[in-house]
Amino acid sequence: MNNLTQRLVTGVIGASVITTLMLWNTYSLVALFFLLCMFILYEYLLVVKPIKKHGDAKWHIPGNMLAGVLAFALISGVFLQWWSLVWLVLALPLIASLFIVELYQNRPQPFQHIGLRIIALVYIVLPFALLPGIALLQGSFQPVLVMGIVYTVWTDNVMAYFTGRWLGKNKLFERISPKKTWEGFVGGFIMALVCTAIFAHYSDVLTLYQWLGLGAITSITGTLGDLVESLFKRDLSLKDSSGILPGHGGFLDRFDALVMAVPFCYAYLLLLGI
């Protein structure tokens, strides 16, 4: 199978599983994004592990994974009403503990280790923990908004890829991602708006213009998220975050746009009063 065929097969299977779990019920949606979060967090911790080249420093992946689990549970649990908002104060000692633990590690460049952990929590865990909140913004399980964001990201990615291949000439951000073009960005942006217009037709959660606003935000911030991950991989001299998904690389490679788009989309929806 060539790379494009692998991408299509993996994409269809993955999209089917993700759609089913998003629609099934609240718990399947939470389980889906928790597992995706953990897979991506694990990939991240593995690829930043080469920091050991600065010395014989230990990089405790299980401990960092546990911090991710706790952060996800604290944030998503508030939206699920498993506990009150006041429980989020536990996040403060959790963050402070990242600094305290470093006192006892006796390794070079301690603040680089602290920074890598904080990046993991903000860049990976927070967006996935917000997704259940988006599904429950109206007080009951309404997965259409989450589906709209996820499908818009997918539509934008796919159409930007094919438009860029067919028409791309002008580089979007050559220093970071030489293959991305303005033509691809515009193609993805237009189809992202079409995608949200379709959601507006079949759903009354948002008005047409509100859906189009969500589509624009998702497309722009998703593209920036893709560029951020390219910057991340370039800094670490990586081609992909892993090779677990045939034709796609790793989980972070597939969800880089989503993790950047979600905080912006959540803020947008709150400002709309949804």
Image (cartoon, rainbow, N blue to C red):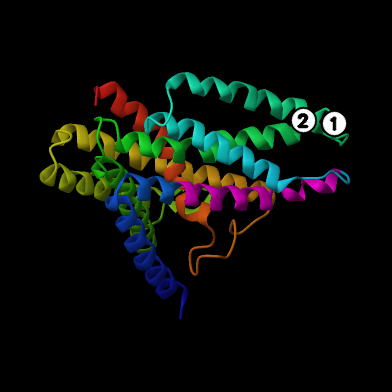
The percent coordinates of residue 162 (x first, y second) are 35, 61
Could you tell me how far apart the alpha carbons at marks 2 and 1 are, in whole angstroms?
Answer: 6 Å
Task: State the residue at coordinates (57%, 25%).
Answer: 91
Q: Is residue 267 left or right of residue 260?
A: left
**Would residue 175 be seen by someone viewing this image from the given angle?**
no
Residue at disc 2, secondary structure: helix
Callout 2, which amino acid?
A: Val
Q: Judge by depth and name the residue closer to the eye, 202 or 180.
A: 202
The percent coordinates of residue 97 (x first, y second) are 70, 26
**Would residue 128 be seen by someone viewing this image from the given angle?**
yes
Q: Is residue 139 left or right of residue 253?
A: left
Membership of 140 in magenta stretch: no
Residue at disc 1, secondary structure: loop
Task: State the residue at coordinates (55%, 34%).
Answer: 71
Q: Which residue is mark 1?
A: 104
Find the magenta span and give its range. 34-54
Q: Which residue is mark 2?
A: 101
Q: Judge by depth and name the residue closer to the eye, 246 or 103.
A: 103
Q: Is residue 26 left or right of residue 258?
A: left
Membership of 46 in magenta stretch: yes
Taken as a whole, is the magenta stretch helix, strand or loop? helix
The percent coordinates of residue 124 (x first, y second) are 53, 41
Q: How many marks?
A: 2
Callout 1, which amino acid?
A: Tyr
Which of the 4 image quarters holds residue 112? top right
